[in-house]
Amino acid sequence: MSKHSFGWFGWLSAAGFVILGLLFVIDLFAVNVWAFSAFWTLIVALLAGIGALALYYGNDPTDREPEDVTT
């Protein structure tokens, strides 16, 4: 059975999704709060969300503790 978890890179991607998603919602109701258009903010937020899911279900290289290879 596969173990799904995040490393620091996955958490960074998930935080980017949440923050950009909130900026998108704020940009819908307020004008000129964020430097980019709401459309591009949504696109980047969706890419961050897809990346977070890929790191969660895939192999996040930052998830594991460093292995001791000395014998």
Image (cartoon, rainbow, N blue to C red):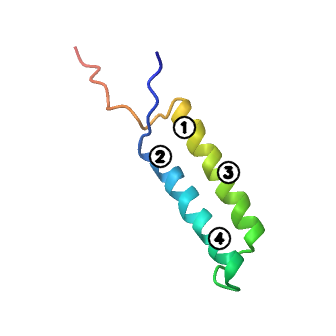
**Comparing labels 4 and 2, the label whose residue is closer to the camera:** 4
Is 4 placed left or right of 35 in the picture? left
The residue carrying mark 3 is: 47
Residue placed under numbered mark 4 in the picture: 25
Q: Earlier in the sequence, mark 4 or mark 3?
A: 4
Label 1, label 4: how many angstroms apart (C-alpha)?
25 Å
Q: Residues within 10 Å of mark 2 (few under 14, many from 20)?
A: some
- Circle 4 residues within 10 Å: few <14, some 14–19, many ≥20: few
Badge 3: how crowded within 10 Å, few (<14), some, or many (20+)?
A: some
Quadrant location of the C terminus in the rendered image: top left
Which residue is under mark 2? Answer: 9
Q: Amino acid at mark 4?
A: Val
Mark 1 burial class by Cα count in 10 Å: few <14, some 14-19, many 20+: many
Callout 1–callout 3 Cβ contact below 8 Å: no
Element at label 3: helix
The residue that label 1 is drawn on is 55
Residue 16, position as x, y percentages in the image: 54, 58
Q: Residue at x 58, y 67 (%)?
A: 22
In the picture as drawn, the residue positioned furthest to the front comes out as 29
Does residue 67 appear left or right of residue 24 in this picture? left
Q: Nearer the viewer, mark 4 or mark 3?
A: 4
The image quadrant of residue 69 is: top left
Q: Secondary structure at mark 2?
A: helix
Question: Earlier along the polypeptide chain: callout 2 or callout 3?
Answer: 2
